[in-house]
Image (tube, grey):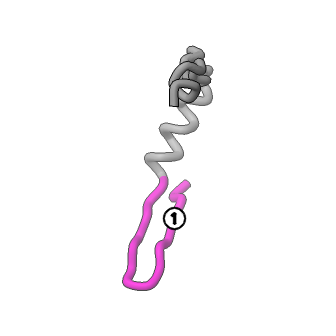
Amino acid sequence: MAKIYSKKSLTSIAMKPEKEVVSFLLNYSKALHVLKTNQSLFEINAN
């Protein structure tokens, strides 16, 4: 177990996304609607 915790994590790298990417993802998540029925799951993108 000591070897698992002694490795550096790959998530420690600081990522700086561009403003356009963040804006696109936020707008997409606002437009996405999920409908759950008894048998199915529908994803509707209202663009």
By secondary structure, the bulk of the magenta-drawn segment is best described as strand
Packing grade of label 1 (10 A; few <14, some 14-19, many >=20) is few
Magenta span: 32-47
Q: In this view, does 36 lie to the left or right of 46?
A: left
In this rendering, the answer to whether 36 lies above or below 44 is below
Residue lying at 61% horizontally and 30% vertically, measured from the top left = 21
- For the residue labelled by badge 1, is the local secondary structure a helix, a strand or a loop? strand
So how many labels did they put on this image? 1
Q: Where is residue 17 in the image (x, y as percent from the top left)?
A: 60, 21
Is 40 contained in the magenta span? yes
User: Which residue is at the front of the view, 3 or 22?
Assistant: 3
Compare residues 41 and 8 and report the one nearer the observer: 8
Instruction: Please provide percent x and percent y for residue 1.
Output: 51, 31
Residue located 54% across and 38% down the image? 25
Q: Name the residue under label 1.
A: 44
Whether 23 is drawn above or below 7: the answer is below
Which residue is at 47% across, 46% downward? 29
Give the image location of residue 37, x and y in percent: 39, 80
Asked whether residue 35 appears in the rendered view, the answer is yes
Please state, as top left, top right, bottom left or bottom right, where the C terminus lies in the image.
bottom right
Q: Nearer the viewer, residue 7 or 42?
A: 7
Which residue is rendered at x = 49% and y = 71% of the image?
42
Q: What amino acid is at disc 1? A: Ile
Q: Is 44 left, or right, of 35 in this rendering?
A: right
Outermost residue toward the front in this view: 1
Is there any visible trace of residue 19 in the rendered image?
A: no
Can you give x and y, in whole percent of width and height, for residue 43 in the image? Answer: 51, 65
- Residue 42 located within the stretch drawn in magenta: yes
Residue that sits furthest to the bottom in the current view:
39
Q: Dividing the picture into quarters, in which one does residue 35 lie? A: bottom left
- Is 17 placed above or below 47 here? above
